[in-house]
Structure formats: structure tokens, C-alpha cells
Amino acid sequence: MTTQQQPPVLSIEGIIKDYPGVRAVNDVSFSVESSTVHCLIGENGAGKSTLIKMITGALLPSQGNMKINGAPYAPTSTQNARENGVATLFQELHVVDELSVLENLTLGMEQSRFGFLIKSDLEERVIQTLASIEPSINPAARVSSLSVAQKQIIEIARAASSGASVIIMDEPTASLSEREVERLFTVIRKLRSQGVTVIYISHKLDEIIALGDTVTVLRDGKHIVTKPLSEVSGRPELIDMMIGRCVFESYTPRNNLSEEVILSAKGLSNNMLKNVSFEIKKGEIVGFYGLVGAGKTEIARALFGADEVAGSIVFKGEKVGGSPKEAIAAGIALVPEERRTQGLFTNLTIRENIPVMNLRRMSNNGIFRADAELSAATHYIDQLRIATSSIEKHTEKLSGGNQQKVVLAKCLFSKASLLLLDEPTRGVDVGAKTEIYDIIRNLADEGNSVAVFSSELEEVLGICDRIFLLYTGSLESEIINGPDVDINDILNIVTGGNRGVTA
Ligand SMILES: Nc1ncnc2c1ncn2[C@@H]1O[C@H](COP(=O)(O)OP(=O)(O)OP(=O)(O)O)[C@@H](O)[C@H]1O
Ligand SMILES: [Mg+2]
């Protein structure tokens, strides 16, 4: 029997990308084998998204070559990459809510590689593809009626039915619930069995271990290793390859917690929240944990006065919750979940972004102090290890995780006495997570209160003194963190166990 060696579906050969002042991708070479899930990991700013943009034709390399199935590949646009069988699942969804599933699937395809097909054949083809990966979605349904996860599956189906042999996914699970993640994984495995190759980027290492066949690690723009996941011993080895050191997160009970109540919320109700009441004490780190849709963001926004809510919120003896302006004046700051649209002025530089929440601190009798702005920005770039060549960089040019750190720095700099952090480490690498947790603990030790709204159990168990468990808008239970916490209990409650719903 002769075994014929198939060329890799994609080869990257000595790729370099230079930006003014940074070599974002530095002489990277590796191959991606056909019909595999190939994971790409690395710290924030390691160069993952930049590399992907070159593979997908959105950016031109400064140097180097690529090959698809052994043939030269130099895409000049994302359209051109698609014609070569390379499709990308963007972080922002590109579906049209007003159209049906079928209309979305065939949108723009008429002019592309299936231009010769008559419409009904084209429709037949996409309906079959959709059915083969997710039969539960009705092609006639309006896209506006679908969940984020289902919309994502529409995008995947669109890529698959356009004949893509490589589909790239950059942090696809960021806004999916655990069950939806499982569904996505099933879809990805199905694609792989149909001969599609998936390049998968995520900071969630458990996902990499569960899903990946091969892993490539980038660090500071350089290629560190490409190896089969079957040869990786587990999370610690992945972390070590990514950041060159091992980090470990575990909760240590904080002593002498104050009993002074700083915030008291009673009977918060709106279209999402159902009669939610709780207290937060001075110097305490509280967690709000629940699945996507449990009401975490709604509580954060209500406390900040961003959404209308019935009930009462009293902070340091005064009623708040009327408007963000009122909240900020009282000493409450919010780091929102959707950082790019709500948290950052992407057209400003890092130096300009950090002080905007607290211009008062920057001015001396109303005179703006440029030196104070500079020193604040420099301090946080250092403390949070924001990977940037200059503080004069526009934040839109930072990597996703580093943008998140700038938003956090803004909030930390505001000197609020209650910080509301909605998914504070989403998209942040494991090393930077530890630093963010340290900063949160220090702020609390100084007497500030911090509320962490998170869909990562590991996160709330790692840093919070007390954890509120949410299920569909109700506060179901309160847990004092410590060595005896029962994780199964928590999972049972946040999936409706208290209500007799079986998870
Ligand atoms: N348009 C740009 N102009 C200048 N520098 C840029 C630009 N885009 C990215 N960079 C820089 O290139 C480097 C790599 O960024 P990239 O977005 O590829 O990182 P990443 O690995 O995707 O990180 P993350 O996990 O945070 O998403 C960073 O130092 C970033 O600041
Ligand atoms: Mg990125």
C-alpha cells in the first residue's frame, strides 16, 4: 500500500507584519493539516488576530508566503480569500436581522463562486448544508428571532455552503452560554468530519483541550511551538508555553471584613429582574454568578443608574440608581461588558482614555494637568501590563485583550468606592487575569467594594468573598466563599435546580 502524503491545507512560511514601532508578527512558520481543529493561543497582543487577518486577506503581510494545498496563496481581500476557500467568523456578527435565515445564507452568493447556479439550486444547497450542521433552525425563520448562538451557526453554515475548506474563528464563544458552547462544538466537530479545517482562537484553555487536535502558541509575535494536543499534558503546560511561567489562582479568605453595609438594594424589578434584594459591605468583593441571560448585566446597569428599575438602591445613605451621572458623583463606577462599544473611545489614545472617567482628578482648580494624565496612564500600562509600543497609540489599534485592560484602568483610576465589573476578564489572557485579580484584591483591602459580574465560575470562586447566584432574573441563593463550597450545588442552582427545573 502506498501512502500519499497530502500537503497541509495551509502553510505559513516566514510571515512578518510590521506596524509603526511594533513587529506584531515576527517570522512565523507552521502548517495546518486538513480536517483538523487547529488552535491558536497566546497572551494579549501576542499577534493572533494580526496573523488571522493576513490569512483571511484583511491585511497584507510585510514579508513571507502562504500556501493553500501546496499552491501559492496571497489573498488581497477577504472576498479573494473566500474564493480560495478561506472564510472567517467575525467577532461581530454579520447577519441581517430583517431577512430570513435562507436569505441570509444566500446573500451575496449569486455573484460569487456559485454564480452559475440557478437560484433554486443554490437555495437547495444551502438548506442541505444548514440541515447537515444544525437541523433545528428553520430556513424560513426571521434571523431577528434567533439567539446569538444560532446567528453564529448561520454564519458558519454560510461559510460551509460557500465551499470553504478553512473556517477561522476568533474567540467565538465570548457571548455564548455553556450549553450553546457545547452546541457550537458539536457543529465544529461535524464540519471537521466533513473535511473542513477550523482554526480556533480562544483564551479559554479548557475549550482548547476539549476541542483541539493541534495547538500553535505565539508569544510576542513569535512562533513558540506547534504540537498535537494529545502530547500536551494539560492546562499548566499550555499556560507555561504561552507566558513562560506558571500562574495559579485560588481564593484565600480575607480577614477582618467590615460589617458596614455600603450599598443596599431592595426589590429591584424590571423586564428582566424579579424582586432582587442584596447588600454589599465596605471592603467586600462580591460576585454575581449565573449563566448568560441570568440578569447579571441588568443588575450592574441598574446599580449604575443606566436602566430604569423599580425598587430602591441606597448607597452610603443616599438614594442612587437614577442616572449614571448620579452614580459617578456618589462614587460608583461601571466597567461594561461590551468594551468596544460602551467602554472605550477608540479614536482616542491610551493616555487620553484612562483619565476620562475622572477629569476632576486631573485638574488643579480647573486647569487641566497634562503631567498627571501622563503619569496615570503610564502607571496603569505598567500595572496591567498593557502591551503597547506607546501610550500615544489609539486604542482601536490595540489587541482585543489590551483594550479590555484600558477600560479597566479607566475604572480603577476613577477612584470610585464601589466598582461594578461586568465580565472583567473576558478576552484577557491567563497571566493578565492574575494581575487584574491582584488589583481587585488591593482595592478591596484599601476599603473599596467591588462587585464582579461573571459567567465564569472559576473567576468568582477565585476572588469573591461572597457570591450571589442568579437564575432567570432572580437572586436564588447566597454563598460565603471558602474551602467547603460545593460546586455541584452552585451549578444546580444556576441551572434552575431550586425551581425544580432539571438541568
Ligand atoms: N492597526 C494597528 N496598528 C498598530 N499596531 C497594531 C494594530 N493592530 C494591532 N497592533 C499591535 O500588534 C500587536 C498584536 O496584536 P493582536 O491584535 O494580533 O494580538 P492578539 O494576540 O490578537 O491579542 P488578544 O488576545 O488581546 O486579542 C499588539 O502589540 C497590537 O498593539
Ligand atoms: Mg485578538
Image: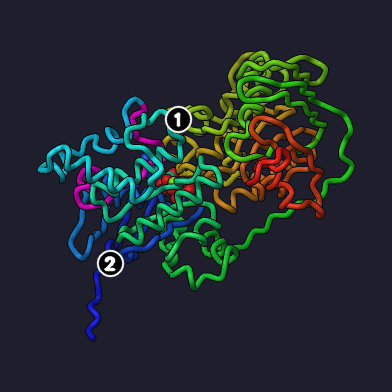
Mark 1 and mark 2 lie on one chain; the one further toward the N terminus is 2
Q: Mark 1 sits on what residue?
A: 346
Q: Residue 74, how many percent across, how many down?
A: 21, 53
Disc on res. 257 = none
Is residue 443 shown to the viewer in this render?
Answer: no
Left or right position of 54 against 392? left
Span highlighted in magenta in the image = 76-97
In this view, the mark in front (1 or 2): 2
Q: Mark 2 sits on what residue?
A: 8
Q: Please name the amino acid that badge 2 sits on.
A: Pro
Mark 2 falls on what kind of element? loop
The image shows residue 68, relative to residue 81, as above or below, that is below
Q: Residue 141, how many percent across, how many down?
A: 36, 32
Residue at 44%, 70% in the rendered image: 228
Closer to us: 26 or 96: 96
Does 78 appear in magenta? Answer: yes
Looking at the rendered image, the quarter that the N terminus falls into is bottom left
The image shows residue 171, relative to residue 473, as above or below, that is below
Residue at 73%, 23% in the rendered image: 275
Left or right position of 5 against 306? left
Left or right position of 440 against 481? left
Is residue 326 shown to the viewer in this render?
Answer: yes
Tell me if mark 2 has few (under 14), some (14-19) or many (20+) residues whose alpha carbon lies within 10 angstroms of its own: some
